[in-house]
Amino acid sequence: MLAVMLLLSMVFVPAVSASPSQNSDEVSESQARQVAELFIKKISAQEIPEWDNAIPSNVTEYYNLDERLAAYSFVVSKDGLYLGYLLVSASKSNYPVLEFSKGKSPDMKCHKRN
């Protein structure tokens, strides 16, 4: 019985540790950062002018209940000042930007607000 459980666990390890290149639906952190940069430019021109020339920083990864990467949270900052946050999907089959706000990010206790 122990040997069977050991073999089964070995079968599931590759599926759990698959890299983004092996999973065509997964968005890498680098890709998510590019999406964040483009969205910050777009939103600063349309709705939040104070985000002009802001950058995405301090990324936090969010996982779903199946322990799969679900989203990246980026702090939006300019000259070291916190301006807000945005959530970028970690899945190509979802909307690219899930949420953005000038308010506190869901993980705000990890970041100082200036």
Image (cartoon, rainbow, N blue to C red):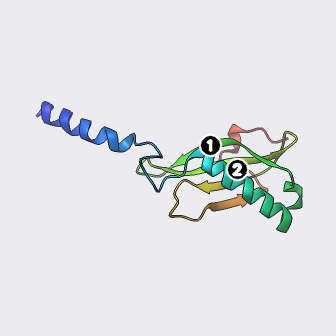
Q: Mark 2 or mark 1, which has the lower sequence index?
A: 1
Assign a secondary structure to mark 1.
Answer: strand
Q: Amino acid at mark 2?
A: Ser
Residue at 83% in and 61% down = 44
Q: Is residue 85 visible?
A: yes
Say which quarter of the image contains residue 60. Answer: top right
Q: Disc 2 marks which residue?
A: 105
Label tally: 2
Quick one: label 2, few (<14), some, or many (20+) residues within 10 Å?
A: some
Give the quadrant of the C terminus: top right
Q: Position of residue 58 (x, y in %)?
A: 70, 40
The x and y percentages for residue 25 are: 47, 56
Quarter where residue 15 is shown = top left
Q: Position of residue 92 (x, y in %)?
A: 52, 60
Q: Report the front residue among 19 and 1.
A: 19
Q: Nearer the viewer, residue 41 or 113?
A: 41
Residue in the picture at 54% in, 53% down = 90
| Residue 113 sits above or below residue 100 on the image | above
Q: Residue tagged by mark 1? A: 60
**Image position of 56 (left or right of 95):** right
Quick check: 44 left or right of 57? right
Estimate the x, y position of residue 47 in percent, counting from the top left. 83, 67
Residue 106 visible within the image: no
Q: Residue at x 61, y 50 (%)?
A: 31
Q: Nearer the viewer, mark 2 or mark 1?
A: 1
Q: Residue furthest bottom?
A: 46
